[in-house]
Image (cartoon, grey):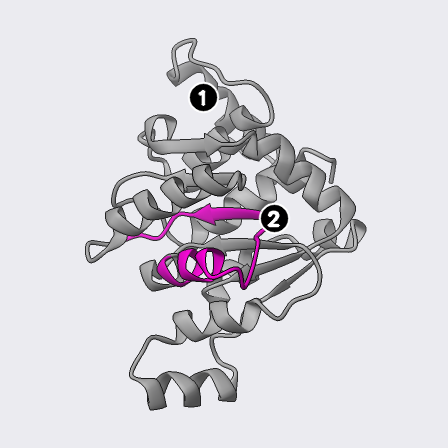
Amino acid sequence: MVFEIVSPREIEEKSMATITAELNGRTWPEPEFSVVKRCIHTSADFDYADNLVFGNDAANKGVEIFRNGCVVVTDTKMAAAGINKNALGRHDCEVKCFISDPDVIEAAKARGCTRATVCMEKAARETRPVIFDIGNAPTALIEIDNLIRTNKIRPAMIIGVPVGFVNVVESKELIIETSEEYGIPYIVAKGRKGGSNIAATICNALLYTMGR
């Protein structure tokens, strides 16, 4: 068996060409199309062509938010690690994950709730526009919903793609409903699929729209 030797950029270009071809003519307006393709590229799962929902012009608004500077708050270190820091830095953006902060751990233990819940409460103290990038914890989306409805935060954007089986589908539907009610841009992967890698991928797709 002979393998073709190709550069990383060539691998990406060929992968994207394969994805485009296998979508059989299906397309989306940019930058939505870039988000869809990169989620498929990350997961090799074409279901993302059907389960990604873009609400309130989220893809275009997301690019604008990044361009003007913001804080991305994730629910996992993995999602935070996967977002391109050079691309963030070029636009005066930063990523924060509070999941291992001692005060978060202590508060979650004392209250008997998840650390993700406390993380979202801590994020409400941010003074810059916040993009919530949630790839793991449904409780994070549930708390974001609570914070919105109690007027403690107004997210610039919500990316809701937790993966799993318990409260995952329901929390995504909840955040879609609330985001529509409050006019908040959102990108949600409906159903059980998602993950920290998909959360990071969506941010990177929007950042790459502005050039690497």
Element type where label 2 sits in the image? loop
Task: Please determine whether, in this image, residue 16 is positioned above or below residue 210.
Answer: above
Gap between marks 1 and 2 measured at Cα: 34 Å
Q: Nearer the viewer, residue 39 or 74?
A: 74
**Residue 177 occupies quadrant:** top left
Element type where label 1 sits in the image? helix
Q: Identify the magenta region.
A: 142-163
Task: Please determine whether, in this image, residue 83 is positioned above or below residue 204.
Answer: below
Q: Nearer the viewer, mark 1 or mark 2?
A: 2
Pointer 1 local density, CA inside 10 Å: few below 14, some 14–19, many at least 20: few
Say left or right for 69 vs 35.
right
Say left or right for 124 vs 45.
right
Task: Please determine whether, in this image, residue 24 is positioned above or below residue 204.
Answer: above
Residue drawn at x 37%, y 52% is 195
Residue drawn at x 52%, y 59% is 151
Pointer 2 local density, CA inside 10 Å: few below 14, some 14–19, many at least 20: many
The residue at which mark 2 appears reads as 156
Say left or right for 123 vs 54.
right
Residue 126 visible? yes
Amino acid type at mark 1: Thr
Q: Nearer the viewer, residue 11 or 103?
A: 103
**Residue 207 occupies quadrant:** top right
Q: Residue furthest front?
A: 150
Q: Position of residue 92 (x, y in %)?
A: 79, 55
Q: Position of residue 12 (x, y in %)?
A: 56, 33
Residue drawn at x 69%, y 44% is 65
Q: Is residue 152 magenta?
A: yes
The residue at which mark 1 appears reads as 18
**Residue 49 occupies quadrant:** top left
